[in-house]
Amino acid sequence: MFGYVVPHKPEMKIREYDIYKSVYCSLCRELEREFGLFAKFVVNYDFVFLYMLRSGLKNDCIELENGRCTVNPLKKQSLVRSNDDMKYAAACLLVLCRYKLSDDKSDEGFFKKILSQIALTALGRPIKKAEKLTGTLGEFIKVKMLQQKSVEKSGCKSLDLASDATAKCLERIFSDISHDKTEHRILSRLGYLVGRFVYIADAADDLADDIKKHRYNPLAESGNTDCEQTVKALKPEFNFIASEIADCYRLLEIKSYKPILDNIIYLGLPNTANRILIKKKGKKQ
């Protein structure tokens, strides 16, 4: 479900990339500070994007401070000062993490099931705290993930239906970024599209492995095991979603982190799609 909303590094200026890394490290620190040591290990690039979008819609200055990483305490680095936007991104990440780990526990092999159960146990209290901080979000995601399970059990072949639960979860998370009526509507649609993009990218990326391990994947339900051809056929879909995401994004007035967010929207998402398409080239299962 995660790891597809990232910038296109070759096109980033060094200063912008340093800020991006600072936000990533700051989100990691926020997870540890608010939810405990184990929580930091679920830090995710997609939620760096969420934080930067939420913060970027405000006219706030980017406040940096010096800090040290728990993993590498000898190295000093710049970190974004803790704020409500960072806490929101960290809490949303943990709430979603419960269902990602639950999914791994039911779909993966023996050792991954054990590791997923250990992670769920270790993160039990932090996740409950995150659910309190995000109000009804946890219950909303729970309902959507149950719907997702129902779709998977039915062997659904439709990408629209299969991706809907993930898309609706991101729609809800993004819609809570702003209470302005116009921004709320735009962000809802943007979140839905990002969720759809992430789901389809994940399905395409994991197709060969899912076929091999007999896991549900809507792209495999037709019975076609030619992964290269199946993924290649997704190119128009990727292009259409990326284009609509860009159209929604242009309607927002971004006040900070704009060069990095522009990079993610206009270069990062297309680059992710191209990486997946190229990765499958010549690989027939």
Image (cartoon, rainbow, N blue to C red):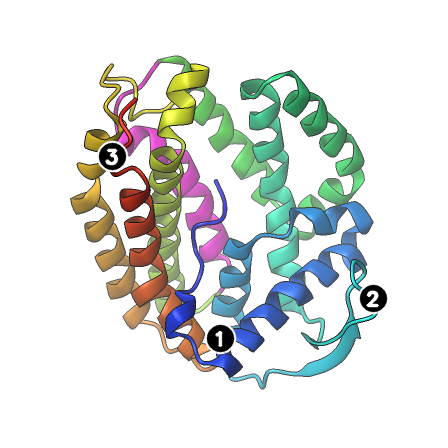
Element under label 1?
helix
Q: How far is mark 3 from mark 1, CA to CA? A: 41 Å
Which circle, 2 or 3, is nearer the viewer?
A: 3
Could you tell me the amino acid type at mark 3?
Gly
Q: At 78% across and 72% down in the image, what residue appears? A: 75
Q: Quadrant of residue 76?
A: bottom right
Mark 3: which secondary structure? loop
Distance between the alpha carbons at the discs numbered 2 and 3:
44 Å
Q: CA distance from mark 2 to mark 1?
A: 29 Å
Q: Is residue 23 left or right of residue 76?
A: left
The magenta-colored residue range is: 155-177
Count of marks overlaid on the render: 3
**Residue 115 horizontal/vertical position (percent):** 71, 28
Task: Residue type at mark 2: give it.
Answer: Pro
Q: Position of residue 67 (x, y in %)?
A: 78, 75
Q: Residues within 10 Å of mark 3 (few under 14, many from 20)?
A: few
Q: Nearer the viewer, mark 2 or mark 1?
A: 2
Which residue is disc 3 drawn over? 282
Q: Position of residue 278 (x, y in %)?
A: 28, 45
Q: Determine the main secondary structure of the stretch shown in magenta.
A: helix
Residue occupying the point 74% across, 62% down: 29
Q: Which residue is mark 1?
A: 56
Secondary structure, mark 2, is loop
The image quadrant where one finds the C terminus is top left
Judging depth in this view, the residue of 76 and 39 nearest the camera is 76
Q: Which residue is mark 2?
A: 73
Q: Judge whether residue 170 is colored magenta.
A: yes
Circle 1: residue type = Gly
